Amino acid sequence: MAKQRPTIADIARRAGVSKGAVSYALNDRPGVSPATRATIKAIAEEIGWQPNSAARALTHARVDTVGLALCRSAHMLGVEPFFMELISGVESELAARGCALLLQVVPDPGQELELYRRWWGERRVDGAFLVDLRHADPRIPGVAELGMPAVVIGHPGAAGPLPAVWSDDAAAVRETVTYLAALGHRSVARVAGLPDLVHTRLRDAAYRALCGELGLDEPLVIHTDYTGEEGAHATRRLISGPRRPTAVIYDNDIMAVAGLSVAQEMGLDVPRNLSLVAWDDSQLSRVVRPPLTALGRDIPAYGALAARTLLDLIAHGETTAHAATGRAPAYEDRAARLIPRGSTGAVGRGS
């Protein structure tokens, strides 16, 4: 019988690494250490491995798929409208271009970076989106080192060398706090998301700065994990505490709805005793009673803009703006705008 040709799987088995790592090493791509690269190449030479010419030709072919990894629980992904609307916008643009979205939920940012490395090494994606940027996020230099086309959906100040699609969270905070102050609220609290996320920090900073500018009471922030349970717990703490606010701004609609339920359970009239504002308007915000004042924007359009930016990057190696300026571009979408409804009103009076 003819002897079988040595394969990448044979090399991976002997080197004790993944097939993706072997692909990185043999194609001289980043992602493995110099020592591992040398070991892999030595094994390849020893067993007589030769690259398949057809496979090599395919290495540079597009697969018409882009990736998105979400470091959130699958449960939260199913109930939080923001990501569902964002993904719908991404999908609408990809479908029009004959491209697919590869979506996976991961437990932590480290595993997210490993997932992108594997996807890129195995040629499963042409590029990827990065969301929920964190302070000193290791994904930014990690993805940049891979050379994989990637677009950050978040503030350009934290995107490093990668293009960013973003909206001005600070402007939305300013509009909201100014509106509440005009209604006579002096004590405005904030039920925020995860404290290490860049957009949470930006919102926190804008909120604290405006409280100072407008002469409001000392800022009061409670950080949560975005769930209804945490939103309810934070609301109980605020209502039961020594500095009960007259208005609360929540970082998503789920927490705001939970906060509304807690306020009613504890005998407070909304909005006469307590005004509530939800970030990111949704059907959920509109069907409760009273309907929630919310910060609204066209989230599907935001996702579509991110998809167009990534496809441009994949097609040309850099976006049009990048080519013109030599800097990673940032595409600003419209900031969220306040939509007043029945959950906000002047202090001590109905809406």
Image (tube, rainbow, N blue to C red):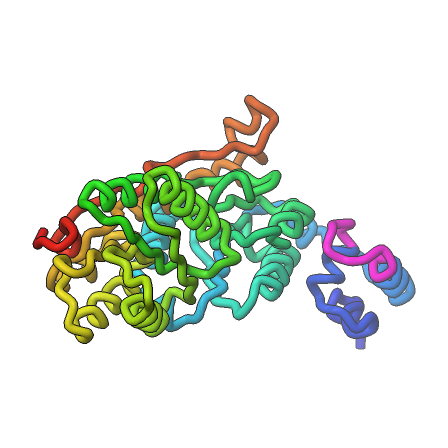
Residue lying at 35% horizontally and 60% vertically, measured from the top left = 191
Residue 303, x across and y down, in percent = 37, 46
Residue 45 in which image quadrant: bottom right
Q: Is residue 34 magenta?
A: yes
Relative height, residue 239 to residue 32 (above, below)? below
- 315 or 236: nearer the eye? 236
Residue lying at 31% horizontally and 58% vertically, measured from the top left = 250
Residue 36 in which image quadrant: bottom right
Residue 305, x across and y down, in percent = 38, 40
Residue lying at 72% horizontally and 51% vertically, measured from the top left = 53
Please indicate whether residue 255 sits to the left or right of residue 94 in the image.
Answer: left
Residue 71 in view here: yes
Relative height, residue 87 to residue 73 (above, below)? above
Residue 167 in which image quadrant: top left
- 148 or 287: nearer the eye? 287
Q: How many marks?
A: 0
Residue 2 in view here: no
Provide the residue span drawn in magenta: 26-37
Residue 113, x across and y down, in percent = 61, 59
- 277 or 218: nearer the eye? 218
Residue lying at 32% horizontally and 62% vertically, measured from the top left = 243
Q: Is residue 30 magenta?
A: yes
